[in-house]
Image (cartoon, helix red, strand yellow):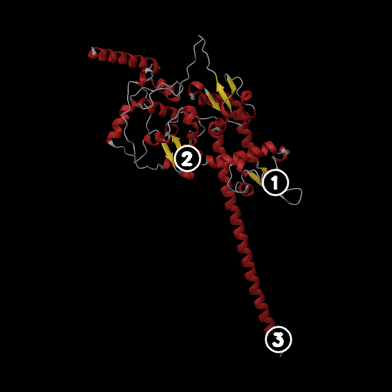
Amino acid sequence: MITELHRNSNILLCKLLHSTRKTIFPPHSNCHIRTYVEVYMKRKKDPYFDSIDSIHKSLKLKPVIALKNFFISSSSSPHDNYSIPISSVSKKGPEFGLSIRVLRFLRNYPSFFEEFEGPLYNLPWFRLTQKAVDLDKEERLVYEQFRDDIVTRLKKFILMSGTRKMLPLKIIKGFRWYLGLPDEFFKDPLDYVKGCGRFEIVNIEDGLKGLSVFDEQSNNGSKRKIFSTMQKNATKSGVYSGGENEAIAFPLFPSKGLRLKQKIKDWLVEFQKLPYVSPYEDSSCLNPDSDVSEKRLVGLLHEVLSLFVEHAAERKSFICLKKYLGLPQKVHKCFERHPHIFYLSMKNNTCTAILKEAYCDEVAVEPHPLSNVRKKYIDLMKESVVILRSKRGSNSRAINQENADSIDLGGANDRTFQLEANVLIDQD
């Protein structure tokens, strides 16, 4: 009796587990358990990725562009290249992320900001240089012509938040530099995205506002599927047909001198064979301890970086996305475990995650419309170094000339005194 009861309870438990597996987890979540391999290696520097100015000068360019935009929005004299007194901006350093005085910062970039004496009390005023004004016009033209592209990138960024399809506006504002969003967007988000899909401002916890996206419908009434960069490239290559549980291998770009242990190589081969789960699909039912879950995380980070202007971002910026994109607690470890896909640069006293594919395969990742303008801004920023070096050289030559003149004058006085002394002796 007891044996039969025990057998029946086991059968009931098996049926329960079987039914739970069917209703809760999608097929790919149970096909593969985690075969965790400790991927640890000494970090290998790559001079190529460490020397990309569009990435590493971007952080220095950010406050320059913010100040440039402040000049344009605050000045009452656009005819005079948006001139303003230093008093109107001197107390706003923290708003632009500056750790030094605003006056000193403006003087560090004479190729952007031209200093002159104001109309009253000889106080310093600044105006934008003509080159800065011309580049600003080009930037605004890009925002106007490629508004649909920029909004589409924002939409994809929001859709990676899973079933909520919503991100707080403060999170979007924190990623505005990476996404290439203009100031006009934050004045009226719904007006800026008008005609580019269905968006809505929603109230979320703690009185915050969020921007949500509604699913677009295809002609037959079904939900329109969004393809990631990985899926698009695999489809073009003919290795992906869009079927369920299909595998897509990540393009690998090993850095020179970077060697993996054999067990890591073996694990990586099996990892590439796992099903690819799009970052735009609901992953709430995915087993977080599976290798498939890790592959989805790699795909999500790959897709996020592919949307950004420089296809790179500070690694610490992903911390605030954990809650909204469903990232694991140690998401930063994913960059370290996949050095053939991501490169971590330690320049500028920060850790920057770079998507290798964007810089090793020119056609794989679609460039951001704003990328060329950013590069031109960086070139203009470099001109400041030349201008300052020239000024220092001129000042040094002027000081040396003054010293030489004083020495010559002193020598001449000595000779005059000697002649006068000789004349007095002769008279005596």
Q: Name the residue tied to disc 3.
A: 424
Q: Quadrant of the N terminus?
A: top left
Kind of residue at disc 3: Leu
Q: Which mark is residue 87?
A: 1
Pointer 2 residue: 52
Q: Residues within 10 Å of mark 3 (few under 14, many from 20)?
A: few
- Determine if residue 180 is in view: no
Any mark on residue 217, and which? none
Give percent across and percent down for residue 236.
42, 21
Give the foreground label among 1 and 3. 1
Give the residue drawn at x 59%, y 55%. 392
Helix, strand or loop at mark 3: helix
Q: Earlier in the sequence, mark 1 or mark 3?
A: 1
Q: Quadrant of residue 235?
A: top left
Decide which of 9, 125 is in the foreground and name it. 9
* Vertical placement of residue 387 versus 28, above or below: below
| Residue 192 percent location from the top left of the image | 62, 25
The reply to whether callout 1 and callout 3 are in contact (CB within 8 Å) is: no
Question: Which residue is at 59% across, 21% downward?
Answer: 200
| Amino acid bearing label 2 | Ile
Instruction: Judge depth for marks 2 and 3 and give the one in front.
Output: 2
Q: CA distance from mark 1 to mark 2?
A: 36 Å
- Residue type at mark 1 is Ser
Quarter assignment of residue 410: bottom right
Residue 233 or 278: which is nearer the viewer?
278
Q: Nearer the viewer, mark 1 or mark 2?
A: 1
Q: Residue at x 62, y 32 (%)?
A: 183
Determine the residue located farthest toward the top in the rendered image. 220
Question: Which quarter of the rendered picture does the C terminus lie within?
Answer: bottom right
Q: Disc 1 versus disc 3: distance between alpha carbons?
A: 64 Å
